[in-house]
Amino acid sequence: MSNSFNRRTFILGTAGAAALASRARAQSTDKLRIAMIGVGGQGAYSWQNLVSEDVRVLCDVDTSRCAKAVERFPNAEVVQDFRRVIDRKDIDAVAVATPDHWHAIPSIWAMESGKHVYCEKPLAHSVHEVRAMINAAKTHNRVTQMGTQIHAGSNYRRVVELVQSGAIGPVKKVDVWCNRRPDPGRVNVKSLPPPTLDYDMWVGPAPWREYDPTVLPFNWRWWWEFGGGVLADMGCHYMDLAHWALNLRHPDKVAATGTEFPDAPNKVPVEMRVVYHYAARSGQPPVELVWWHGNPGPKDADGNVMQLGLGSAVLFTGEKGQLLADYNTHKLLPESQFAGFKRPDPFIAESVGHHREWVNAIKNGGATTCNFEYSGALTETVLLGNVAYRLGKEIAWDSKAMKITNVPESEWKPLIRRAYRGDWKLHKG
């Protein structure tokens, strides 16, 4: 361990006893006592959505990234090591907005220490970590939410209602695409970490590599040690819509192909195609979900890019038509066929806000829409796409046993359960 101390909405709740136990305190103080773990970047988005609460601790391995948050919360304590936060009795909850390789450990330790957790997507860096986070939330009855913020928008709700009310009939195929590409890696290890950064702590449980200013603070996403490329970065946002609308959980087969930068040291795919197969469930047919990234959209049977006018989107194909959606818009296709179509009355309530759902569930009980049970299965699916790509073959996934059944264990296990550097461990123990 580092020695540095610097009606069909598919909502599953994990509030339980923890929310009930915290309700009296929350009602008396009216504000949730929160520690931010990761304050810059996406962490800034989180604290900006938690300004109504009592943000008491700002934790970041690089204290220079806390400046704006300190302006907003001048009485908050600034620390570099999350271990100084985990056991504090004056903290009710933590919001984790670190790089992917640091999601699981502080989240699980916090839940084990009696704290509720909001964690950015993807939920974790490996499938094993995802399962451990789900289990910790269940075991300790914590209120959880993953940061797929677009889930709270009205547009996704209207799309789910159309799919679930049968507007396009049974759905057997979904294409999900994102035109984002990773940035080619560069190697520049001649610089020393800035004095505000505890770099050993930043690397944490990941394999050691020398400090490289081209990797921090954003491009860690394009290195397998710390992130998972475009799929891990964006997959949870877009695949969420298909998982929600079709009540998808775990795929049973995953195959992936892609291309890499020929001369760059980082090997995450530039372009990628992942095919997920889901078995029939609850009267719904089997589904093939195809993820694409790095290109303008999905291709038709002849290999031509489908001209759908959206750079990143989701296309549901049903027996009666298609439904195209991105974050903010959607339409039924072909449009001439659906002229005069009467959409169903809304049956999914509007969200009070993604962060507010979490805060309210802690204070008053109830459910969050992207709790770790739901978002864990979504993240696991996303991560399995990278596993299939790195193995170079279609994988058969036994979700109950958490095993790939058609590949030798020595090949797949390191990709499902990553080893940790030094003495870092997943549970406080």
Image (cartoon, helix red, strand yellow):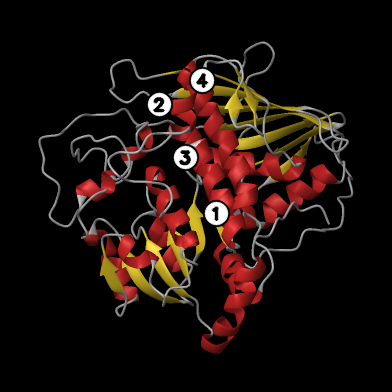
Q: Earlier in the sequence, mark 1 or mark 3?
A: 1
Question: Callout 1 environment at 10 Å: few (<14), some (14 to 19), or many (20+)?
Answer: many
What distance separates the C-alpha of mark 4 from that of mark 2? 23 Å
Residue bearing the label numbered 4: 409
Residue 53 in percent (x, y) is at 47, 77
Residue 312 visible in rendering = no
Residue ID for mark 2: 268
- Taking the image as shown, residue 226 lies to the left or right of residue 186, namely right
Q: Position of residue 2 (x, y in %)?
A: 24, 49
Q: Residue at x 45, y 61 (%)?
A: 110
Secondary-structure class at tag 2: loop
> Label 1 vs label 3: CA separation?
24 Å
Q: Which residue is mark 1?
A: 136
Report the residue at 66% width, 47% height from top.
Answer: 329
Q: Amino acid at mark 4?
A: Glu
Q: Residue at x 29, y 21 (%)?
A: 264
Residues 381 and 194: in front is 381
User: Residue at the spot x=87%, y=52% of the render?
Assistant: 344
Mark-to-mark CA distance, 3 and 2: 12 Å
Secondary structure beneath dot 3 equals helix
Secondary element under disc 4, as helix, strand or loop, is helix
113 lies above or below 129:
below
- Which of pointers 4 and 2 lies earlier in the amino acid sequence? 2
- Residue at the top extreme, as displayed: 302
Q: Position of residue 245 (x, y in %)?
A: 75, 44
- The numbered mark, 2 or 1, whose residue comes first in the sequence reads 1
